[in-house]
Image: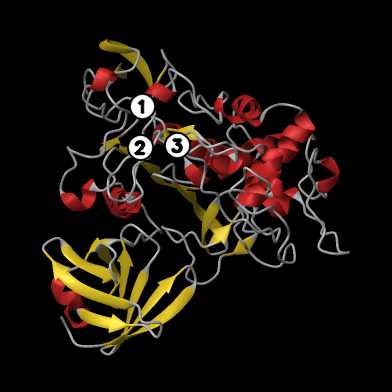
Amino acid sequence: MRTDIPSLCRTCGGGWIPHGTRASKSSAAWTCPRCSPNTVCPAVPSRSWTAAGSSGARSAFGGRADKGHPVVPGPAGGPAEAVTPWTPFQACSLSKPVAVLGVLRLVERGVLDLDADVNGRLAGWRIPSNGDWQPRVTLRRLASHTAGLGTSGFSGYPSGVPVPSLVQVLAGTAPANSPGVRVEGLPGFRFSYSGGGTTVIQLLLESVTGTPVAELLSELVLNPLGMTDSTFARTPTAPFAERAAHGHRGDGTAVPGGWHSYPEQCAAGLWTTPTDLLRHARAVQDAWAGAPDALLKTETARQMLRPHAVLPSGAEGLGGLGHIGLGPYLHMADSDPRWFGHAGSNAGYRCHLLASVETGQGAAVMTNGDAGLAVIGRLLPAIAAAYGWEGLTIKQPYQPVPAAAVASAMGTCTTASGLRVQLRNEPGGPVAVVDSQPAVRLHLSSPTQLLAADLDLLIRIDSPERLILEQDGQSVPCTRSTAS
């Protein structure tokens, strides 16, 4: 794990310069490890930003920060390479706000209209009608997840598996592994997260401009912001792919082939670094402040960070992100946006961005492991405390479970269908054993709730005699039997 205070090198234009390598306390010159590791380069002092990359998503609980997951296999079977400030990770759903930034640039140019029906401009596929009713879906609704579209997310395509075209993904036809995208609720009625909606945006971008989305977003966002270690390319090529972080499952095993491919590039396909994510965040902040060289106009930034919907109770993101703007989630205070950010989850990767609207503070954390939320949940609160973030309380969503705190929950219970669930203490902390499945490690999210570390499972202590198992929105009571 690495945490740096960054500055930009004027020589190479990329990469943060680690804190502590300055030639002298009074000098404005820093040593750049990327372009001139043995010389001194002029640098641009940065504001209070923090970038962190983790090659050991499970190390936060195992005390093995120096022995985390490999990032890139070494040449000829040699030792794995460690994370550097230029190691790209899959940005997962953090791809969405970066893509929307490009969308808003086209809105400013008059190429796109936030409030026009998108169907008339889509090529090769249209949002289907529901019987005789043809919904009117706008770009604003798509960018704020209020279009009523289904298909919340995508699982990606493992190495060696046929990858569908964009139209096949939207239509839900082979070889796509996700259902087709269609309106499932009244547009504008409420927030309903939809990666499918962002994929409609991708088709709109390519239909209107005639340019592949990876090339288009490089021109609109990545290149102007100096995001030199980022790409929306569906299949990263050498030398970029050679230094990319390889994904890992919750048990530490590597994702076969290194990672899954995501043809849903705007929804989940960005490769980037924590540093480059902060460049994106800083661009949003500069636009809000009306900086003369900002990528967006101030009025556009006001629209981006205006709340378009409230998230359902209990669905707030880390840092109290309880509203949605155009792309990013928002933390509101006194009717004003104070913080913005987004989380991301792909096969083998977890990440999070959180940035202040006005103070110049922010952090990006990227991990190459399904258990990366454990790192994020500890690192972001530590960053907030270390840098004195104000007006924001970040609770740690994952903590090791003290044995005494859950002693009354230990034992065995059974569901009405006969599923046997045993909770027991082990040297590494409490675990759940469900029928003949391997033990699942648990973490405390509240005095009465236990979260599984590596899968979607919450165990709620309802009473001394009963537990409630919750998964994918379903709740199943489990009645206590003899303790074991």
Disc 2 marks which amino acid? Ala
Q: Which mark is residue 16?
A: 1
Q: Amino acid at mark 1?
A: Trp
Residue 350 percent location from the top left of the image: 40, 47
What residue do we see at 39% from left, 29% from top? 244
Q: Which residue is mark 3?
A: 278
Answer above or below: position of 76 versus 173. above
Provide residue 88's location: percent of width, then percent of height.
Answer: 41, 31
Return the x and y of residue 136 as percentages of the image width and height.
82, 56
Q: What mark, if any, has residue 51 been given in the picture?
A: 2
The residue shown at (37%, 24%) is: 243
Of residues 369 and 380, the one nearer the viewer is 369
Q: Are marks 3 and 2 in contact (CB under 8 Å)?
A: yes
Residue 200, image x and y in percent?
Answer: 70, 45
- Distance, label 1 to label 2, CA atoms, is 9 Å
Is there a contact, CB below 8 Å, between mark 1 and mark 2? yes
Give me the residue at 45% from left, 61% from top. Answer: 320
Residue 296 vertical position relative to residue 352 in the rendered view, above or below? above
Mark 2 is surrounded, within 10 Å at the Cα level, by few (under 14), some (14 to 19) or many (20 or more) other residues, namely many
| Residue nearest the viewer, comparing 178 with 340 | 178
At numbered mark 1, what does the secondary structure look like: helix, strand or loop?
loop
In terms of secondary structure, where does tag 2 sit?
Answer: strand
Label 3 – label 2 distance at C-alpha:
7 Å
